[in-house]
């Protein structure tokens, strides 16, 4: 081995050899391996969390295949998230009290902003309903200290719909002084396509404030 490093020529050649030949060789090996049978390559595994992502790592405790993105380095080797005992970040967790706060603030913001839209800008209500979605998202975000839990996104979507319906009913009551099922049904059916489309937009915007 020593003669490789004996002369300056060899030394200057070394980086060239490394960068040009070795990567090519490993590429060829990879191609060969792909044409062979799968079980001749026990090292190529699929990450348990990322289907389709190849990896050669395994959790040092449970043996689950994990990719470089999923591996957590611990003093006893690379482990999966579960075995490394990592809890999700508190920012992405919402307890029951937080969810309740989100429901209350979301419903109030949704009902109020839809009602204001219905009463003040009648003809443009639907076009402006995404604003109500932003209001709901911001209200929930503020009430929950900017948490970003999945459960809060569900609450946001739910309160947009509930608030829109509630504001519709209140709006009918304000306009007619009474509410009958026939009246509510007629109003709902005539507005349904627009209502669905813009409620959906409002939901998307509400959720975008919490993710
Ligand atoms: Zn594990
Ligand atoms: Zn992974």
Image (cartoon, grey):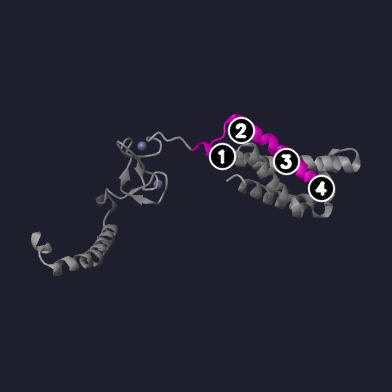
Q: Which residue is depicted at the point 69% across and 49% down?
A: 202
Specify start and end residues of the magenta stretch as a single range.
Answer: 89-116
User: Label 2 to label 4, Cα distance in Å?
Assistant: 30 Å
Element class at badge 2? helix
Q: Residue 83, percent across and down?
A: 37, 35
Determine whether, in the image, residue 139 is placed left or right of residue 165. Answer: left
Q: Residue 4, percent across and down?
A: 12, 63
Determine whether, in the image, residue 89 is placed left or right of residue 18. Answer: right
Which residue in the structure is indicated by mark 2? Answer: 98
Which residue in the structure is indicated by mark 1? Answer: 149
Question: Which sits earlier in the primary sequence, circle 1 or circle 2?
Answer: 2
User: Label 2 to label 3, Cα distance in Å?
Assistant: 16 Å
Question: Which sits earlier in the primary sequence, circle 3 or circle 4?
Answer: 3
Which residue in the structure is indicated by mark 3? Answer: 109
Which residue in the structure is indicated by mark 4? Answer: 118
Determine whether, in the image, residue 57 is placed left or right of residue 2. Answer: right
Element class at badge 4? helix
């Amino acid at each position: 081995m020593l003669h490789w490093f004996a002369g300056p020529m060899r030394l200057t050649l070394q980086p060239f050899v490394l960068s040009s030949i070795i990567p090519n060789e490993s590429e060829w090996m990879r191609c060969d391996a792909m044409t062979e049978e799968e079980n001749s390559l026990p090292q190529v595994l699929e990450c348990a969390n990322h289907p389709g992502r190849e990896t050669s790592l395994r959790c040092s405790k449970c043996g689950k295949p994990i990719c470089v993105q999923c591996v957590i380095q611990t003093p006893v080797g690379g482990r999966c998230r579960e075995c490394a005992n990592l809890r999700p970040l508190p920012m992405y967790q919402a307890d029951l009290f937080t969810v309740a706060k989100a429901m209350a603030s979301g419903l109030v913001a949704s009902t109020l902003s839809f009602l204001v839209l219905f009463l003040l800008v009648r003809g443009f209500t639907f076009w402006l309903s995404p604003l109500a979605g932003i209001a709901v998202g911001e209200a929930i975000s503020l009430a929950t200290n900017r948490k970003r839990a999945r459960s809060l996104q569900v609450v946001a979507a739910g309160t947009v719909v509930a608030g829109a319906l509630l504001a519709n009913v209140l709006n009918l009551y304000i306009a007619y002084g009474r509410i009958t099922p026939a009246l509510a049904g007629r109003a709902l059916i005539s507005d349904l396509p627009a209502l669905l489309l813009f409620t959906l937009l409002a939901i998307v915007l509400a959720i975008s404030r919490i993710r």
